[in-house]
Image (cartoon, coloured by chain):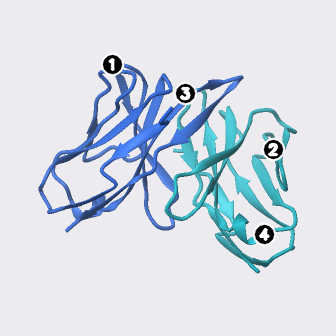
Amino acid sequence: NAGVTQTPKFQVLKTGQSMTLQCAQDMNHEYMSWYRQDPGMGLRLIHYSVGAGITDQGEVPNGYNVSRSTTEDFPLRLLSAAPSQTSVYFCASSTLTGTSYEQYFGPGTRLTVT
Amino acid sequence: ILNVEQSPQSLHVQEGDSTNFTCSFPSSNFYALHWYRWETAKSPEALFVMTLNGDEKKKGRISATLNTKEGYSYLYIKGSQPEDSATYLCAHSNAGNMLTFGGGTRLMVKP
C-alpha cells in the first residue's frame, strides 16, 4: 500500500491564481480530511469527508472547496489564492479501528502564495 | 470549536532525562484522544488513541494516560533520546471523527 499520497510537494502561486491539491489513499478508508499547519497553531481542519459524495466544513473552510467523487480521492481546490493561504497542507484518511479512528497523514504540500 | 491546549509549547531536556507534557481538552462530548509524533519535514505519525477514562497506553519508552472527567492527558517519555526530538501533538475527536488539534509540544533532546 502506498498509504496517503499528496501532490505536489511544493507549489508557489500568485495571488488570485487557482489550483488543486491532490490527495489519494489506497487503504479503502471512508474518512478523509484536509488540514493546514501554520506556525504555533497546530493543525486546523479545513474540510472533511465521511464517504464518497459526502463532504463537510471544518474549522477554517473559507477559500477552499472539496469534492469526493470516489473513495480514493479527495482533492482540495483553492479558487483564488491569497497570501493568507500560505501554509503546509496535510491530507489524512482514517478508518474505524476497534472503537476509535486512527488517522494516517500524507507527506504534506508546502504552498506559498505571493 | 473545542479548545485543545498543550503545555509546555517547547521543552529542552538532556539525553537520559524523563519528561512529560500535558494535553487538556473540554470533557464534554468526548469520544477519543489522539497523540501524534511529528518529526520535521515528515507527516504526523500516530502514537496512541485512547477512549476510556483511566486508559493507559505504552509504546516502548513512551506512555500516555487519560482522564476524561477532568479533561487531560499526559504523555511520558522515559530516558529521552535525541531521536525522540519531535513535536508531539494531541487531538480530541468527537463521534463524527472531527479532530481538533492542540498547538503541540516541541521536544528537543540534547545528546
Residue that carries the numbered disc 3 in the rendered image: B96
Q: Residues within 10 Å of mark 4 (few under 14, many from 20)?
A: some
On the same chain, marks 3 and 2? The answer is yes
Residue that carries the numbered disc 1 in the rendered image: A53
Query: Quick one: SS at disc 4?
Result: loop
Q: In the figure, the blue chain has which letter?
A: A
| Numbered disc in front, either 4 or 3 | 4
Q: CA distance from mark 4 to mark 2?
A: 24 Å
Q: CA distance from mark 3 to mark 2?
A: 20 Å
Q: Is B29 displayed left or right of A76 in the figure?
A: right
Can you give x and y, in whole percent of width and height, for residue B1 in the image? 51, 44
Residue that carries the numbered disc 4 in the rendered image: B81
Amino acid under label 1? Gly
Earlier residue among tags 4 and 3: 4
In the rendered view, tell whether residue A81 sits above or below residue B95: below
- Colour assigned to chain B in the rendering is cyan
